[in-house]
Image (tube, rainbow, N blue to C red):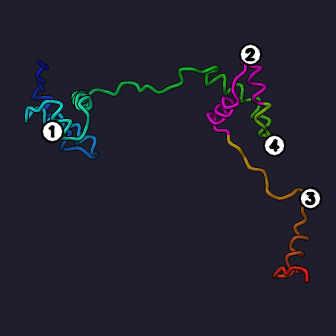
Amino acid sequence: MARTIRISEEELQQAIKLRDEATTATELRKAMTVILMARLSLDPNSVAELLGTSRCTTFRDRLDVRNQDDPQKGSWGGRRRFTLTMDQEREFLAQWEAKAKSGSVLAVPPIHAALIERLGRTVAPSYTYRLLARHGWRKVQPDTKHPKSDQAAQEEFKKNSQRMWLPPA
């Protein structure tokens, strides 16, 4: 026989408070999970069917209501696997930053080659692109006009050219 669910009065009051202050459907669903279990003595399967969730979700929702006042635990995010620390990456990019500020055009292949030399092993080019993006580097588009173009000649051509092209007769 399955264990009976015991919901304390304190937990029920937390759920009622959450229900009254809910701003999203998720918060309301979590509160209603506990309220239905406590007030109507429904089992998790029935509550899941009423709310359109799974049985496991009812247990998760109850746990969320019970622990809503506790400070959040650290998230699972972060860099677990890295070849260089953030400070080492900044130090590596500092030499290239000086070249970029002086106005020279930087390409990724030389940076990638220097990175491989620094690490002492090969890495995918995507690692270099992600490293640059992580530190706020971005691609700057070159000017779209030819360096030998003559603006005066282009304007003269526009003034004196035919308005409509006709095929040769």
Question: Which residue is tagged 4?
Answer: 103
Q: CA distance from mark 4 to mark 3?
A: 20 Å
Question: Which residue is tagged 2?
Answer: 120
The label nearer to you, 4 versus 2, is: 2
Q: CA distance from mark 1 to mark 2?
A: 60 Å
The label nearer to you, 1 versus 4, is: 1
Residue at 79% x, 38% y: name it: 106
Residue at 21% x, 30% y: name it: 62
Element type where label 4 sits in the image:
loop
How far across and down, in percent of the image, does residue 96 sit?
76, 32
Residue at 15% x, 38% y: name it: 16
Q: Is residue 26 above or below residue 78?
A: below
Mark 4 crowd level (few <14, some 14–19, many ≥20, 10 Å Cα): few
**Mark 4 or mark 1, which is nearer the start of the sequence?**
1
Question: Which residue is tagged 1?
Answer: 16
Asked if disc 1 and disc 4 are in contact, CB closer than 8 Å, the reply is no
- Magenta segment, which residues? 111-137
Residue 117 on the magenta segment? yes
Asked if disc 1 and disc 3 are in contact, CB closer than 8 Å, the reply is no
Q: CA distance from mark 4 to mark 2?
A: 29 Å
What quarter of the picture does the C terminus occupy?
bottom right
